[in-house]
Image (cartoon, rainbow, N blue to C red):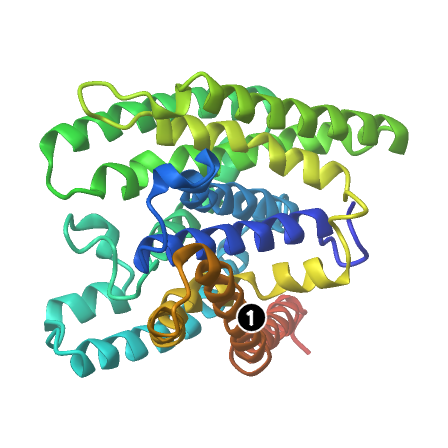
Amino acid sequence: MIGSSNRIFGLDVLRGFAAVAVAVYHCIALLSLHAWDDLPAFTKYLYIAVPLFFAISAFSLCVGYDGRLEGAAAIRRFYTRRFLRIAPLFYLMMVLSVARRAYVGWGEPTVPDVFLNLTFLFPFVPGKHESLVPAGWSLGIEMLFYILFPVVLVFVSSLKRAFVAMVLATAVSFISSYWLFVMDWSPTFFWMALPVQFAFFIGGMLLYTAYRRIAGASVELQTGLAVAILGATIVGLYLGGAFGIFEYRYNGWAVGSSIVGFALLPLVLGFALYPVPFLVNRATIYLGKVSYGVYLIHPFIIRIVGEPLQQALSAAGWNAWQASPVIIFVVLIVTILLAGLSFRWLEAPFMALASRRRKADLVREVTDASPAQ
């Protein structure tokens, strides 16, 4: 459902759920709360919510900019808005992360490290690609996609062309992932490189072209199709886990991670077509609104809140099964509260600045186009 501001609330909610999924995954992983084999199988794949972010981002950008990126001025405004949306909080978290590194004795980052992060060029350098900001690797990938988006949007202008782009991007994703795994430049680069993740962005754009065709249909048809998509996705995820498809490895290469990522993509179209009533409400829409902060702030909160809390509960005699729900809950609550403050006092002002710059540019364009008096 598209609101009055062309915002699809179902996608906001899905974005919020994805942010929480990544936060829960990192709580378990960074604090070693449990062995993965002791938990439900799906928990080890919660990090795959990041490619879901990419697909949602691409879909949302298409909603906002399809047919509106004509001319250098419009593209310049697009880049400005995207930079002001991502950079302020990223830079703040980089400062906090560097300060924490110094505090715990990990040493100061090098000047090249700082330069790579300030310019969002770190995805190009294996070993530096994970960023100085915990979980920041995806922001570098996101910024690179923003640079390419105006060009890609022109090419992916129809369902047929989007499908062709998706086939090509998927092939590049699997081939490049395996090649990078064999090259072994870094233990995680085979998953976190732009050629590997780019297909998920294209997937979001493909789903948008399908959505654009379906959006004119009756509400009943859209709802029925959305329910079918969501149901089929859930069944597919269950079967993929039950039959070990997501665990598949080829010569040691964890190809299953990519398979899970692609299996999740239909959720974007399903949530766009039908805001499931018991999932889409004011609370979950707000969670989606502050999801960027949730995603970027939560690793810091895990260390400065979750870690001491874990130690305190352990000292009090709590076992892992008693302590882990409390730790995850507290980390999420603190993170969401701080994300709300970040959105109110940091992100929103910079987005407002981008809007003012856009209005000023539009006035300037009209003035420049007016006949001389």
| Labels in figure, total | 1
Q: Position of residue 200 (x, y in %)?
A: 45, 36
Q: Quadrant of the N terminus?
A: top right
Closest to the observer: 337 or 352? Answer: 337
Residue 80 in sight here: no
Residue at coordinates 12% horizontally, 78% vertically from top-left? Answer: 105
Q: Is residue 73 visible?
A: yes
User: Mark 1 = which residue?
Assistant: 333
- Residue 335, percent from left and from top: 50, 71
Instruction: From the top left corner, tell me how far across and down residue 167 is, in percent.
Output: 44, 20
Within 10 angstroms of label 1, few (less than 14), some, or many (20 or more) residues? few
Q: Decide if residue 220 is on the left or right side of residue 245.
A: right
Q: Point out residue 299 in the picture as x, y percentages from the top left corner.
A: 37, 65
Three-letter code for the amino acid on which mark 1 is drawn = Ile
- Residue at the (40%, 19%) spot, across then down: 245
Q: Secondary structure at mark 1?
A: helix
Q: Where is 261 relative to 291, above or below?
A: above
Of residues 239 and 208, the one drawn nearer to the viewer in this rendering: 239
